Amino acid sequence: MSKAFKFTLPNRKSSFHTVAEEKEAAERLTEEKLKACLQILPGLLKQLERIPDPRDPKKVKHQITVLMLYGILMFVFQIASRRQANRALTTPQLLENLKALYPELNDMPHQDTLHRFLESINVTQIEDAYIDLLRQLMRKKKFRHLLHQGRFLIAIDGTQKHVMNACFDEHYLRRKVGEDKYQYYVYVLEAVLIFSNGMVLPLMSEFLENSPELQALEDDKDWKQDCELKAFYRLAARIKREFPRLPITLLLDGLYANGPVINLCRKNKWQFMIVLKDESLPTVWQEVNGLMRLDTRREHYHERTFRGRKQAFRWVNGIEYEYDSRRKSEMVHVVICDENWVEVDKQGTKTAKDGRYAWISSEPLNCQNIHTYCNLMARKRWLHENNILKEKHQGYNYEHIYSHNWNAMRGYHYLMHIARLLNELAIHSVYLTEHVKEVGIRLFIQDFRATLTYRALDQERLRLLAESPGQLRLVWEDNWKAIAA
């Protein structure tokens, strides 16, 4: 990214002059954040309430909606552990404010209660309810103005969630780290929706796992673990099943530059932009380099400046890529982008930089669409990488699994993604985005938590807000360079 587009939060004193002014601002911003949450939560909690409850009805103290609300708030407030949640989410003032929004809420549960519940239910139903929520938002055209040429960008990438030295569940993956020594870990393939305003929303998670049969094998040479490509095919099948007619463009890294993945995308009628590494698909590279040398008139060449970088695009359309011992083939289009820019460090020293990028495209390329497909679509994949970093290091505690039980761990993961959606929608709402630019995302969330937890808010205003939260309106412009963590 060019130095010119980096963003630093303002370094200045508080703009408030009186306690009353500060209180009014805190309450107004909290109500705006609650409006975004109240557009989503009531319907979602009704969906989650349908999850079969395995508990003894005579011993049930907290309804499913209360448990789910408790779990979601833990991640909305970015609380780092179950122990901390027990202290932070059970304060009298927070309970009083929440009762005005949810009259059925009598008391907050203990984290152990939520943990036992997640251990015993089918937690995939939490993600199912979340996916149904996304489907409803799409039907209501909430994202209509945030699409790229009327298509939904879906980026898919894998990441490690947690590492441990002991195997607490037979589903965990394992790797050898020394003689007779193993590590056990959780690896997840994440699919996210990326919008033109820079907003990134979780879509689906596919956990890589071992079956009990594989875990029982003692001979290392017979140990066959789940892998990212296998998980991709499962995830792609789920996306097609849940969104059969959704216009989709997949953004994938170099791992997926192969014939079977391209063929799957074509069968599903998905467009794609896949990173093409130098060492990948040598026959394709051979043809690309040969045809580019013949393009002496530069008919497939385009120059432009984008975000402070000088770009030179070259492309070749209609390359037949053969695979599976040449028994199958796919028609692909390849584009290469060479960039040059100047970075300036804190001392004012200028350094010339350059970079080179290549992609496989499902669609033929030309001077009119090269900017859209490469800059506005393919390059958006970095937002997914940034999204993973945010979830790991900026408050969502992605790498803290909250439970060693495989089922409960996944349940907490899905609740975290619900909370992430609520925060992202609020951050990108027209009423809050300017404030978030000013204070930063983490401070915005901290202030929201502090206001709800420690301030006695007007109960009547909260009740009216719950009855009529208004409409969710999202910003249209790209705030990628302005919203900092």
Image (cartoon, rainbow, N blue to C red):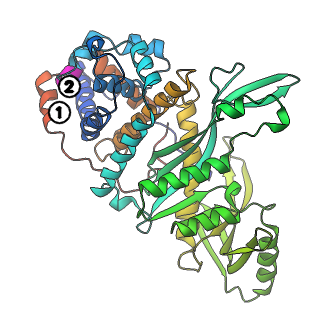
Residue 86 point in image, percent of width and height: 40, 12
Q: Which mark is residue 187?
A: none
Determine whether, in the image, residue 461 is placed left or right of residue 217. left
Residue 223: x, y in percent? 78, 36
Residue 115, image x, y percentages: 45, 18
Residue 449: x and y, percent?
Answer: 35, 23
- Measured Cα–Cα span from mark 2 to mark 1: 8 Å
- Which of discs 2 and 1 lies nearer the camera? The answer is 2
Badge 1: how crowded within 10 Å, few (<14), some, or many (20+)?
many
Label 1, secondary structure: give it.
helix
Residue most extreme to the bottom: 297
| Residue at x 59% of width, y 80% of height | 366
Front residue of 471/319: it is 319
Residue 438 appearing in the image = no
Q: Earlier in the sequence, mark 2 or mark 1?
A: 2
Q: Is residue 270 placed above or below 197 in the rendered structure?
A: below
- The three-letter amino acid code for the residue at tag 2 is Tyr
**How many numbered marks have been drawn onto this rendered protein structure?**
2
Q: Secondary structure at mark 2?
A: loop
Under mark 1, the amino acid is Ala
Give the label on residue 466, or none.
1
Quick one: 283 or 176, which is closer to the camera? 176
- Tell me: residue 25, above or below residue 242: above
The one nearer the camera, 141 or 6, is: 141
The image shows residue 398, relative to residue 206, as above or below, that is above
Badges 2 and 1: C-beta atoms under 8 Å apart?
A: yes
The residue under label 2 is 102
Residue 393 visible somewhere in the drawing = yes
Residue 122 horizontal side relative to residue 474, left or right: right
